Amino acid sequence: MIWRLGYTLLLWGALPAVLARLYWRSLREPAYLEGLAERFGLYGSVTPRAAGRKLVWIHAVSLGEVHAAKPLVDRLMTRYPQHEFLLTQMTAAGRKAAQTMFGERVHIVWLPYDYPFAVRAFLDRFRPDLGILVETEVWFNLIEACREKFVPLLLANARLSERSASGYDKIAPLASRAFASFAAVAAQTEEDAKRLSRLGARFVSVAGNLKFDVEAAPGSEQLALELRARYGSRRVFLAASTRDGEEAIILDALDAYPLRDTLTVIVPRHPQRFADVAALLEQRGHAYVRRSANRDVPGNCNYFLGDSVGELAAYYRAADVAFVGGSLLDYGGQNLIEACAAAVPVLVGPSVYNFALAAEQAMQAGAARSAGDAAGILKQASQLLDDPAARRAMGDAGLAFCEKHRGAADRMAAIAARLLDRAPTARD
């Protein structure tokens, strides 16, 4: 197919840039260079599944997707204890999270880059009986190779903004074949389902959002108490999952509209940016304590940098008010469901298209509020910090909102089971 050939040639042309970026990221996160050959379909001593056993492969690209996938993986592992499970990722944070959550209960490897030889080698090595791609992970050569090798694919927890759908419209001949190749699609919302169907997906159902079923990491409550003790007696405003450029905007707003008797905790979305945010605080002359320092925050220090991975649930539980990042600038917003589940009042900026329905429903439920800019966020934060009753009401609304929308993991596990039970006996 001419479109896929053109796509593959572009990938080959981008290879030097891909390798350069991989090396650059490894300078801050050395794990990016672990198992480098796997990114090209070479798995060396990695042991494929045992003869006669089916293998379920789940691809969760990064940290957020790994967390979202956990309740689905747990249900499938309970239902099929005789099967083996393979988890793939593309980022170091996602790989570390998978290792922490599942340990040796699953195989964990990198998904190869989307070169035809690499994805075919991956499929030949592991011979999965079912593939589950979490959220909208659409790799054209990988999907085509699965089609050729009769590996059924489920697109789980699928979401697709109108902006992304318009992008796929521009490469419709390539995209429509890929979306039509999925054996089933479990969309988060009716709007997602319509957009996916418009692009060619078949067998589309609305199953909800897996993130409502995610349980807080073990020990989160205790860690939240420890963090709160380190913070001291002041109130706590949390800026969580912030993206590049947002920290500067928040600091500007705090300089203009300081929060009285309040410690500001900043937790960047991506670990590779921890050093950048630390440098930003230093450049502006703000005293701060890093989470990695494991020490108490002095009374004259107004900032705490959450430079840790996998502790976001505890940060939410230790906060009085939480702003969820990715929403002040045009990133589409990060997951606000985890914040609601922690019973903390939630604030978001104007850009929430990645979680449009969840954000709308949370606001309707009284669990979240929005503002058009950082000044508006701080104004609402100040009001809530001065009103304990309003904070409790929003926190209770958040818990009720999350409880109401649970069940996606069970629905997606049922879809996966139908596909898996139809599959022939494991290929040997």
Image (cartoon, rainbow, N blue to C red):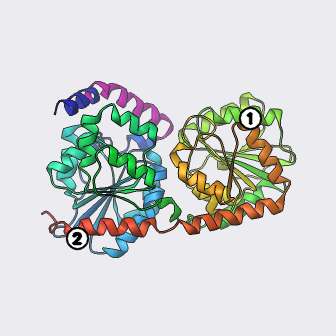
What span is in magenta? 12-29
Image quadrant where residue 350 sits: top right
**Residue located at (64% from left, 35% from top):** 246
Helix, strand or loop status at disc 1: helix
**Residue located at (22% from left, 59% from top):** 128
Query: Residue under circle 1?
Result: 251
Q: CA distance from mark 2 to mark 1?
A: 54 Å
Helix, strand or loop status at disc 2: helix
Position of 63 with respect to 265 (left or right) is left
Where is residue 262? Give x, y as percent.
82, 48
User: What amino acid is at disc 1?
Assistant: Leu
User: What amino acid is at disc 2?
Assistant: Asp
Position of 80 with respect to 234 (left or right) is left
| Numbered mark located on residue 421 in the image | 2
Position of 368 with respect to 338 (left or right) is right
Where is residue 424? Give x, y as percent.
15, 67
Quadrant of the image for the C terminus? bottom left
Q: Is residue 149 visible?
A: yes
Position of 428 with respect to 196 (left or right) is left
Image vertical order of residue 403 relative to residue 304, above or below: below
